[in-house]
Image: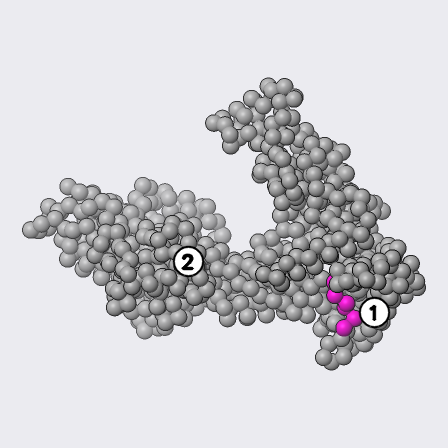
Amino acid sequence: MSKGYYIVLEGPEGVGKTTQIELIARQLQKYGYAVRLFREPDSQSHLSARAIRQITQDPNYPLNTRAEVLLYNAARALSLEVIKQAREQGVICLVDRNYLTTLAIQYYGRGDVPDYDTITSIINFAVGDMEPDLTVILDAPVDELGKRMKRRKHGERFDNLDLGFLDRVRAGYLVEAKQRGYPVVFANESSEKVFRYVWEYVAALFNKQPAKTQPSVHMSSPPPILRAPSSHEPNAQTAAYLDTTANPITITDAGRQKLSSIVTNNESNVYAFNDTLDQVTVAAAMARLSRRGDDMRVTLLDEFVDKAGKDEGLIQRVVTAYGDDSVQQLVGIHMVVENASNLLTKQIEWGRLASYLEQSTRYIYYDQKDASGRYKYYVPTTLSSATKKQYIKTMDQLFDNYSKAVRGITDYLHKTDSTPQKERDGAWRSAIRAQACDAARYMLPVATKSTVGIYASGQAIESLIMRLMADGSKEARLCGKALLTEARKIIPAFLERADKPERGGATVAYRADTRQAMHALVQKLLPETYSSDQSAVTLTHYYPKNELDVVPHMVYEHTTMSEQEANAAIADLPYKHKVKLFSSYIGERLNRRHKPGRALERITYSWDIVCDYGIFRDLQRHRMVSDLAWQPLTPRYGYDIPELIEKAGMTETYLDSFDTSLELHSNLVAAKKITESQYATLFGHKMRWKATMNAREAMHFIELRTSPQGHPGYRKLAKIMYDKIAEVHPMVSEAMRFVNKDEDAELTRLAAERYTQYKLKVLDKK
């Protein structure tokens, strides 16, 4: 006698589980299988279980959540005995709801017993080894569930519940489905269409183990292996593209013709997508890879081509079934934030898993005015009318000073530069402009507006949105909301949860509450003092103490030893052999883009840095760092006066800007506008920040930031970092062969600009 199956359909009340159970039963019975239907909480065959259910389902018997959990699982333990016996007799047991309902309702829905582990332990004790062979989660929007329940007139305990409760229950099912790897079927369509999606999973279960004739059923022949049907309505287009009678399914000539406009290669094992198919559809199609064994081009033709855009539920079904996070990672989006203050740009660029591009203060004169005749600076909306008036007056003065300085320095360089007139080409003019902007940018306020370009996955965009919405700055919160509004116009299905109260809303609240609580506690427990240690770069921690300790990790991929065995083997080698292995791993680097392997990531350096905000702006964009954090901006750490400012006779104007900035900052602090006071600080004001980077990133960071075209400020800072690494890890520093150390900044900048002009001319000739 063949063993039967234990199949469960789960999902919120009103999602259509009973209907689908009955449809599955009829289909299986057509194939000659013995089928038995069970439904939690009623229709149980065990007498004791039924008695318990009568209590739990009668609203006249008040129960708290703990009692519900215990009683439901007592009944479950009894009813599972009946299911187990039936399955052992070869019966297909179709069960409407199971233990996930307890978690969804009592834990996620009720929320008054926040002890997930205990509830799970009770469930595990009741269930024992009776795990379902297949569990499918049915899902539908809460509004639709509410409508369906209103049409029903039951008197059970969980009918007539509010939509907020339903929303939490639905979220609970989806969370559990993702954690446990259960398939999810979007059930907001006709019962026939939903059945086709559900049947795909049921049929796949039977195809793994061909069914045999059940002795309790009269059959003239054994039932066939079930073929999982396509998850869409059959149509002429699909039939033209695919030969579904072949095993495996093959692509027809018409299908290959259709694919020629979608992918770069119809036959190769490697191909890319053209821009004829939108990226949302591509992401959804790629998500199907985990559940379908066909060539992905078959999946495209079968489920997505000619349907994307016509079937509004298609993308939503895929996102629901395969998990928001998984599919979010497969879709990318370009976004732009205009008129962001330089305080906001750094908040935007904090996220690692995205790419950013920002307007440079090194190559653009920032004294241009907008259409209304104002300089481009941000005005906080939280200021009183009197404070706002002073703020605007001060900002105008700061930009007037900047304009005077940057134009004056440019004129000074034109007059004093020794380059012959005939050699003053485009590269020379660009180099002069960069020198002037480099010196004058110290005078720009943090309120200066900029534009940030962002390219990120749907997941990274969602994370950025929630992070901004939880920020203490109103500018950041408004930006987060605007990003969500615009991103939803492009990838709506991927951002459905971003502002839901129980999902994104809860995450935003968690971040905001944690930040506020931590700030309050720090204010209470720690003195509000500013450190007297203003060293530009402090190496606060490094690992390991002996850089040769990384050698076992360098050899690991070339051996068959465990990591512990490799450590022991390397420890026994002579010193010279360890050095040779280290050097061999680094190899012969011919330029800074030749990067050694990831064993160097075992080496880490933690830095505490004091530098001006302009330098921080440039360096903060490095994303392969850990524990990146910076302190609120303040004038208290002072500032330096660039040599070029003094040479150009702009010292008085420069000092006036810093005095004016300090006055505005002090007035904003006195008005309790602590966050807003940061807008008054200047790029030249020093600030404190920290970061940890591995040796591989340190190599990239230092070699890049000491390159000829780099700003003199961060060139100097990167050189200090290099020297400190050399003190503790000389072999690592020796591997950094492309650190520029002593070049003249003006000459190297001009050389870099001329090389850029040369490359542009070469491109123009092509």
Q: Position of residue 676 (x, y in %)?
A: 75, 66
Amino acid type for the residue under numbered disc 2: Thr
The one of 44 and 227 positioned closer to us in this rendering: 227
| Figure quadrant of residue 434 | bottom right
Q: Residue at x 76, y 57 (%)?
A: 614
Q: Position of residue 143 (x, y in %)?
A: 41, 71
In the picture, the quarter occupied by the C terminus is bottom right
- Span of residues in magenta: 361-368
Q: Earlier in the sequence, mark 1 or mark 2?
A: 2
Q: Residue at x 60, y 32 (%)?
A: 585
Whether residue 560 is visible to the viewer of this picture, yes or no, is yes
Q: Give the residue pinned by disc 2.
A: 264
**Gap between marks 1 and 2 measured at Cα:** 52 Å
For label 2, count other residues whose C-alpha is less than 10 Å away and answer few (under 14), some (14-19) or many (20+). some
| Figure quadrant of residue 659 | bottom right
In the picture, the quarter occupied by the N terminus is top left
Secondary structure under badge 1?
helix
Q: Residue at x 46, y 49 (%)?
A: 116
Q: Give the residue pinned by disc 1.
A: 403
Q: Position of residue 656 (x, y in %)?
A: 90, 65
Q: Position of residue 606 (x, y in %)?
A: 70, 42
For residue 753: magenta? no
- 650 sits left or right of 259 in the view: right
Secondary structure under badge 2?
loop
For label 1, count other residues whose C-alpha is less than 10 Å away and answer few (under 14), some (14-19) or many (20+). some
